Image (cartoon, coloured by chain):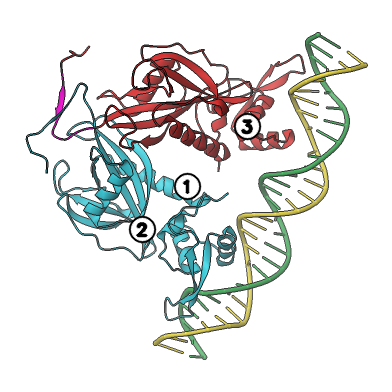
Chain colours: A cyan, B red, C yellow, D green
Amino acid sequence: MRAPEQTFSYRYPHPAVTTDVVVFTIREQRLHLLLIQRANPPFQGQWALPGGFLDIDEDIDACAARELAEETGLSDLYLEQLYTFGTPRRDPRERVISVAYYALVSNDRIPEPVASSDAAAVAWFPFDALPDTAFDHAAIIAKAHERLVAKLDYSSIALQFMPEHFTLGELQAVYETLLNDELDKRNFRKRILSLDIIEDTGEQKRNGKHRPARAYRARRPNRVEIIK
Amino acid sequence: MRAPEQTFSYRYPHPAVTTDVVVFTIREQRLHLLLIQRANPPFQGQWALPGGFLDIDEDIDACAARELAEETGLSDLYLEQLYTFGTPRRDPRERVISVAYYALVSNDRIPEPVASSDAAAVAWFPFDALPDTAFDHAAIIAKAHERLVAKLDYSSIALQFMPEHFTLGELQAVYETLLNDELDKRNFRKRILSLDIIEDTGEQKRNGKHRPARAYRARRPNRVEIIK
DNA sequence: CCAAAAGTGTTCACCGTACACCCATGA
DNA sequence: TCATGGGTGTACGGTGAACACTTTTGG
């Protein structure tokens, strides 16, 4: 631990740098995102994105992953830098530059996340029923959603929402949720299989009380393929 | 001016924040970019991206525009945030987070840029014949190029390279340079005109000693349209 | 009249879209 | 046997790609 009276001096003023992470998942056919309830001022008690200050010797990506793990218990997810937000008075305490990330979690690995010293509570909210959020986090969330939807089209990013083994029906449901549209089953299967991004595991997966379906897996685990 | 002995103290160490800008243009059918020769250590005398430290009350976008104007004399260009680079030891002086931007200049507004106190010289280099660059600027340049080429496909970003009035032949040459490929004249015209992003000015433009061509202009000046 | 860029349509292959029925399972 | 999701093929239309000749101008 650092001695509490220690200070760090610079010839010119330096901003603080934080990371904030927009974590998406799909639950019950709806897009959700993870917010924490702030334990400390400013905006104490308000919902906000998980995130926090960059350590002086820490890589930015590592900071995003660490803050996410500390505040929500989630680790080892797909994490991508989104945009850097730095409007001068976005934080009332001091000048803060936030490097925003977004993350996707597969829908079988959704621990009901635990709170930490910075987060009084952690909860999933449906994307279309978000509470008011602290700072400029609404703008960060909007940008993350825009990026997510744009990437659906030309990358295999949707696979990041899937568990290790999944069926084509489940994958189609994820696309339908994200695109907010219904898709034709035969066309969907043809297109996805022709992209060569998933492979048959040989196993079967039983979802309801109905006919079991073939189980597939992503061809390259943890990678997002750019299509064409 | 700030008194030279003044310092700024924080309870936790803060990184410095800079912006760096990758400025592209097209000259003589080749993609070029603008580098400055560093007037001061570190990397004194080496070529680098124009950029510099963020003022404590300055918006990040404004910082990129300001540094660009100060070091190169260029202003009022298409400027878009690219990515934030912050590997711990990328700058030997202290921890520096660089918010990178890229900019596009139309090929009629290429002032041979002037040097300033931070830049001993400023010059355009062909993209395929770049000198060694300072810091991690080679990685920033690579990422900017990747973004530029990707955006060609689904946006009207190429129009940013064009002067106010231009011909279809000139526009096609820009696409050919960026894609490093030849395009069919008839197909190109059909596609571009169907996108409805340029309009006939009614005027003509004489390029060589040959038949004059219709002059077009971008339908929305200074905007980048997302196609589809 | 020659050189050089401007301007202009049609054909074909491929891909995305629309569309309906039988199968396997558990209750 | 019924309800529910799993699994499969074909026909059509639109879009992108290939392709050649005439026009206008300056020298």
* Amino acid identity at mark 1: Ala
Give the side of residue B81 with respect to residue A134, left or right: right
The answer to which of B206 and A68 lies nearer the viewer is A68
Residue receiving disc 3? B175
Residue at image location 14% in from the left, 51% down from the top:
A117
Q: Which residues are magenta?
A: B6-14
Residue receiving disc 2? A105
Q: Secondary structure at mark 2?
A: loop
> Mark 1 against mark 2, which lies toward the viewer?
2
Residue at image location 57% in from the left, 17% down from the top:
B108
* Mark 1–mark 3 distance (CA, rounded to whole Å): 23 Å
- Disc 3 chain ID: B
Quadrant in the picture for residue B170: top right
- Res A150 label: 1
Quadrant in the picture for residue B217: top right
Give the side of residue B13 with respect to residue A33, left or right: left
Residue B70, how many percent across, how many down?
A: 38, 15
> Is B82 contained in the magenta span?
no
